[in-house]
Image (cartoon, helix red, strand yellow):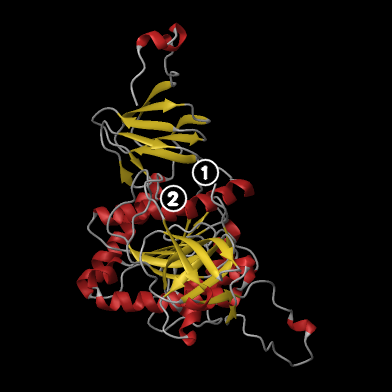
């Protein structure tokens, strides 16, 4: 195509300039942070020789970092100048930051790692808990980043099935972390141990949730047994934000299953007290029993919530969940092109994860127990209800392996043809599937 001559361009078009973005500089004193709430694209740049970090990852001087639809805090230990380009919803400096407290937690963990390294024992096992929108994921990222900068390789355990930091939403996962999270793209992991729960709330199948936690712990123990660096580095576990009723019961089960040595409670006095009773007090022997080899007592650490944490409405959470699924297939900045493939119905075996409330025991005859096993997967024929589903491909050799089979990857079902009996799907990579066993839960996604 030829370039238009200047005679074909009107004067107003020649004079048109790109819209000027708002630009502002902020000078941070030592141990201050800049809080930014961005709903449109915003660019941050560290200008001088000072130091700054975002959730445990240091910023490079002079490099422009881009963010959108994100809340973040730029913290400086020694002071710096930050340039903000764009139109954030809010941007302000704050000195009431919990970062010194978080640093003290890191130093305590590092002392435990050094002791484990010298004695050949297990490293620290930290569980981070608190209500929704309390900053659990941010603290996890900070502590993982600080650990990797000391040459450690901790295991990150992600049980927040509504968010899916390691893999996709609906997944319980663990992975070794050997480098700080990317400032723009987030945590970078490879070969995670992942199990598909299939829902974004444990109420859909609490028995399966407990079973997958125990299976995940078994895999963690095996990994630590074969890697002394990971063993002494320990683990950091991020939990879901539901801390009442069943959510609390599952949290206690998680702490005991992981043999937690320390538990951080963010901004919740009652949760702190209740956990102390169940983990160290008279209720500590409740099932599942804590193994005799587990350190006792469990150290409970209460920390304040950062003033920069913003409550997110349900619609925002749903949007963030869909964004996470999109990132899985298209990459953090839409840099990947997912492969499209087709499967004949007779080439696969599709199973559905049980979902829905279990019948209360009060509805059963006196002394009777439920006979239906909600941890069992039900084989179903591919049909219209598969459309737009997020389907896990699992490493399984037989149907018996399915309930606790490790996830190989995910497919997005984009078309179901009952005439030709085929499924069309998107996959993050081309090539044959590693297994014919597929698992479907309640998660659906419509690509925009």
Residue 244 vs 78, above or below: the answer is below
Which quadrant holds residue 13?
top left
Q: Give how far across and how far down residue 363 sits, in percent.
A: 79, 83
> Are dots 1 and 2 in contact, CB under 8 Å?
yes
Q: Give how far across and how far down residue 145 sits, in percent.
A: 32, 52
Q: Is residue 303 visible?
A: no
Furthest residue to the left? 118
Which quadrant holds residue 231?
bottom left
Q: Residue at x 53, y 52 (%)?
A: 322
Q: Nearer the viewer, residue 52 or 110?
A: 52
Residue 399 vs 22, above or below: the answer is below
The span from disc 1 to disc 2 (Cα, nearest Å) is 10 Å
Q: Is residue 31 visible?
A: yes
Residue 203 vs 53, above or below: the answer is below
Q: Give how far across and how far down residue 177 sits, in percent.
A: 31, 60
Q: Callout 2: helix, strand or loop?
A: helix
Which quadrant holds residue 42?
top left
Label 1: few (<14), some or many (≥20) within 10 Å?
Answer: some
Image disc number at residue 138 = 2
Label 2: few (<14), some or many (≥20) within 10 Å?
Answer: some
Residue bearing mark 1: 309
Q: Callout 1: helix, strand or loop?
A: loop
Q: Give how far across and how far down residue 274 sits, in percent.
A: 58, 66
Q: Residue at x 55, y 77 (%)?
A: 351
């Amino acid at each position: 195509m030829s370039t238009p001559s200047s005679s074909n361009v009107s004067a107003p078009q020649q004079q048109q300039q790109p819209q000027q973005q708002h630009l502002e500089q902020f000078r941070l004193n030592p141990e201050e942070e800049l809080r930014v709430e961005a709903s449109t694209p915003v660019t941050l740049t560290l200008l001088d020789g000072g130091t700054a970090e975002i959730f445990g990852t240091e910023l490079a001087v002079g490099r422009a970092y881009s963010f959108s639809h994100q809340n973040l805090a730029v913290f400086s230990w020694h002071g710096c100048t930050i340039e903000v380009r764009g139109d954030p919803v809010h941007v302000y400096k704050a000195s009431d930051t919990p970062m010194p407290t978080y640093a003290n937690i890191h130093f305590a963990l590092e002392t435990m790692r050094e002791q484990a390294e010298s004695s050949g024992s297990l490293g620290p096992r930290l569980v981070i808990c608190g209500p929704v929108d309390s900053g659990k994921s941010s603290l996890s990222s900070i502590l993982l980043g600080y650990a990797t900068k000391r040459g450690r390789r901790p295991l990150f355990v992600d049980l927040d099935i509504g968010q899916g930091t390691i893999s996709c939403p609906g997944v319980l996962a663990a992975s070794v972390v050997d480098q700080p999270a990317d400032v723009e793209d987030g945590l970078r992991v490879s070969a995670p141990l992942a199990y598909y729960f299939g829902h974004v709330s444990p109420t859909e199948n609490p028995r399966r949730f407990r079973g997958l936690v125990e299976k995940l712990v078994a895999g963690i123990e095996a990994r630590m047994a074969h890697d002394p660096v990971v063993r002494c580095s320990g683990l950091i576990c991020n939990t879901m934000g539901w801390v009442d009723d069943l959510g609390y019961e599952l949290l206690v089960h998680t702490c005991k299953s992981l043999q937690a040595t320390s538990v951080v409670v963010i901004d919740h006095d009652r949760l702190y007290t209740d956990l102390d009773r169940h983990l160290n007090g008279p209720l500590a022997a409740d099932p599942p029993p804590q193994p005799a080899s587990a350190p006792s007592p469990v150290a409970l650490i209460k920390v304040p919530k950062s003033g920069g944490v913003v409550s997110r409405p349900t619609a925002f959470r749903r949007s963030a969940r869909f964004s996470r699924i999109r990132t899985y297939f298209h990459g953090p900045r839409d840099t990947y092109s997912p492969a499209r493939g087709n499967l004949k119905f007779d080439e696969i075996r599709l199973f559905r994860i049980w979902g829905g409330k279990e019948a209360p025991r009060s509805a059963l005859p006196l002394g009777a127990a439920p006979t239906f096993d909600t941890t069992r997967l039900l084989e179903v024929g591919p049909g219209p209800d598969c459309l737009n589903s997020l389907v896990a491909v699992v490493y399984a050799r037989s149907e018996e392996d399915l309930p606790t089979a490790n996830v190989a990857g995910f497919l997005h079902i984009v078309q179901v043809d009952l005439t030709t009996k085929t499924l069309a799907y998107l996959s993050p990579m081309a090539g044959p599937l590693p297994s014919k066993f597929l698992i479907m839960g309640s998660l659906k996604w419509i690509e925009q």
